[in-house]
Each structure stands twice: as structure tokens, then as C-alpha cells.
Image (tube, rainbow, N blue to C red):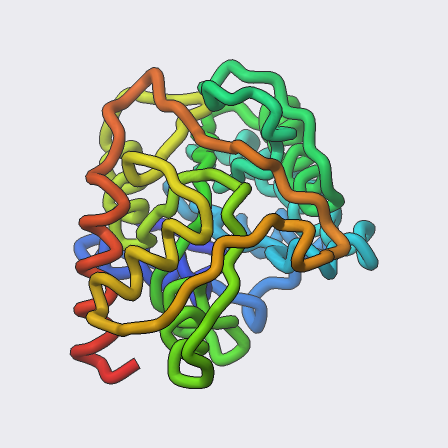
């Protein structure tokens, strides 16, 4: 099967490539397709003649989106509509990735696939716009919402993920302050990539929530990272207000899956990732 992967150099795109090693994979990143150039999307996709399209590309800078919402909406919203339309036209499935930030975080029992989005930020609004256009213009699609993605990315412009950033900061300071009032589920890109591959082979369609099992605050996430890495550092739990940021984050955005069982627990996944980083001296 010929699969077109958009966003191949990002965190998930990097993990997805080996997950489809036995397929004919066309891997595109920013140098191959400009998602802000909407008129170019359909002809470029059609030229590949894919049998499946996975869009793992996104404008992911949550705070910068507050200053550049039109660009965030073009990439996370309008471009998804174009991809959905061309996939419907050529009769192939589109797998689109989305985020827990489409929710406002006010439901303390979490959000299942039927929950109504109510984003708090420009980033969340842009991703929700993509979800809406996918459902309006798409025909055969899978919308995969996930949260707190961590894992290695190949792209030279990729930022450090939370795990890498915590380990790096621990080498520069013996005390770190970490937010302790925002709760969601960390998700390992390697696990999510395998889950996406399994979804494609299944009959499940529509909205799907895929995260590692369990939930935590950023502070609890950091504490587990250092425990798994054997790093001694003093952690101070602080409210999100201690780090004023342009974009408002949801306080409780745990994604509940009603269609499929959860992936393995996030603590186990963090352990595997930390060991991978150590082996690679990262």
C-alpha cells in the first residue's frame, strides 16, 4: 500500500516511519509541502496517488499561535479541510491527528470521543477548526486525539520534548519548579505510532482517543522522569500562574477512550524512552 505521510520529521512522524516499514511510504515534511499554500495541496497529493494519507503535521507552538492565529488556523484548520476534500475525491482514508487542547478542561471526569470541544486558546481553536472541516469535507476518515506527546524527532528545527527538557534543565540547576495543577495523559510517540498502524487495519473510524494509560500533572510527570533516569534534583510543585504564558491551557484534559482499550501506562512508556535516550547519549 502506498501511504502518504505528512509531517514526517516531527515527533509522531519520526515514530510512524518505522511503523510502516513494510509499506510503500512517501514521507513529506515542510520542504516537500507547504500546508499554508492551500491551492497547492490537492494537486500535490493527487500526484502521489496514495492509497492512504496520514497528516501528522501541525502548527504546534501553543503560545506563538496567540500572536499568529491566522497561520495556525491555515495549517491546523484550512489545510486539513483541503486534505479531507482531496482524499474524498480520490477515495482514500485520511488519518488526522488532533489534541486534548480542543477541550476547556472543566470536566473533571475527562473527555470521551463524543464530548463537545470548547477550546481556550488560538492553538485549540485552530485544531478544532481542522476537526470540523475534516468531518464536513471528508468521507472516510479517522480523527485521533492525543495529549502530551513525547519522543524523538528527526527534524533539525524540532524542539526538545518535555522529557528531554527536564533532563537538560537538571544539568543546569539543582532545583526546578514545575506546574502541578494541569492534568493530562503523557503519550509516547512510539506507542501512538503503533496504535495508528493498528487503527488503519481495524474497522474503527471516526473520532478516536489514543493516549498512554493514566494521568498526571507536569510535576508528577517530571518526578517520574527523574526517578526513571536516576537523577537527583529537587522539584518544587507550583501553580500554572507561576509561569504566565500567552495561551490558556486546560486544567484537566484527560482523554477517555470508549472505542478501544488504553495503551500501556505512561510510567512504563517513560521508562522505555529514558533508557532509549541514555543509549543514544541524548
On the image, the x and y values in percent for residue 237 come to: 49, 54
- Residue 25, by quadrant, is bottom left
Does 84 sit left or right of 167 as displayed?
right
| Residue 153 appears anywhere in the view | no
Left or right of 275, for residue 186: right
In this view, the residue in front, 60 or 168, is: 168
Name the one closer to the observer, 197 or 66: 66
Residue closest to the eye, 269 or 1: 269
Image x and y of residue 113, in percent: 46, 20
Q: Residue shown at 42%/63% (left/top)?
A: 235
> Who's the residue at 66% across and 30% down the image?
133
Position of 73 relative to 63 (above/below): above
Q: Residue at point 46% right, 81% down?
A: 173
Tell me if residue 275 can be seen.
yes
Q: Residue 138 location, x and y as percent? A: 57, 27
**106 relative to 82, above or below:** above
How many numbered marks does the figure carry? 0
Q: Is 120 left, or right, of 59 in this rendering?
A: right
The quadrant of the picture occupied by the C terminus is: bottom left
- Residue 120: image x %, image y %? 72, 36
Residue 97, compared with residue 188, is above or below; it is above
Which residue corresponds to the image point at 37% horizontal and 37% vertical from the top-left? Answer: 215
Q: In terms of depth relative to the viewer, which is nearer, 41 or 115?
A: 115
Question: Which image quadrant is residue 164 in?
Answer: bottom left
Amino acid at each position: 500500500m502506498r501511504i502518504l505521510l505528512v509531517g514526517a520529521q516531527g515527533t509522531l512522524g519520526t515514530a510512524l516511519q518505522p511503523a510502516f516499514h513494510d509499506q510503500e511510504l512517501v514521507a513529506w515534511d515542510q520542504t516537500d509541502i507547504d500546508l499554508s499554500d492551500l491551492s497547492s495541496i490537492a494537486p500535490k497529493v493527487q500526484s502521489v496517488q496514495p492509497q492512504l494519507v496520514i497528516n501528522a503535521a501541525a502548527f504546534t507552538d501553543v503560545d506563538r499561535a496567540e500572536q499568529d492565529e491566522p497561520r495556525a488556523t491555515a495549517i491546523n484548520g484550512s489545510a486539513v479541510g483541503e486534505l479531507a476534500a482531496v482524499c474524498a475525491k480520490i477515495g482514500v482514508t485520511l488519518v488526522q491527528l488532533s489534541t486534548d487542547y480542543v477541550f476547556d478542561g472543566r470536566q473533571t471526569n475527562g473527555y470521551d470521543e463524543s464530548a463537545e470541544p470548547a477550546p481556550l486558546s488560538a492553538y485549540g481553536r485552530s485544531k478544532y477548526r481542522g476537526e470540523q472541516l475534516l468531518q464536513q469535507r471528508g468521507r472516510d476518515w479517522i480523527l485521533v486525539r492525543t495529549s502530551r506527546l513525547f519522543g524523538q524527532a528527526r527534524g533539525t528545527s524540532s524542539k526538545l520534548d518535555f522529557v528531554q527538557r527536564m533532563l537538560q534543565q537538571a544539568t543546569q540547576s539543582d532545583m526546578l519548579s514545575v506546574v502541578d495543577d494541569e492534568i493530562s495523559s503523557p503519550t509516547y510517540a512510539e506507542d501512538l505510532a503503533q496504535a495508528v498502524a493498528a487503527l488503519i487495519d481495524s474497522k474503527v473510524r471516526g473520532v478516536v482517543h489514543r493516549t498512554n494509560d493514566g494521568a498526571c500533572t507536569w510535576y508528577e510527570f517530571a518526578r517520574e522522569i527523574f526517578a526513571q533516569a536516576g537523577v537527583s534534583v529537587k522539584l518544587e510543585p507550583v501553580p500554572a500562574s507561576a509561569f504566565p504564558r500567552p495561551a490558556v491551557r486546560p486544567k484537566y484534559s484527560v482523554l477517555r477512550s470508549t472505542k478501544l482499550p488504553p495503551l500501556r501506562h505512561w510510567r512504563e512508556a517513560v521508562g522505555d524512552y529514558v533508557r532509549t535516550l541514555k543509549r543514544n547519549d541524548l
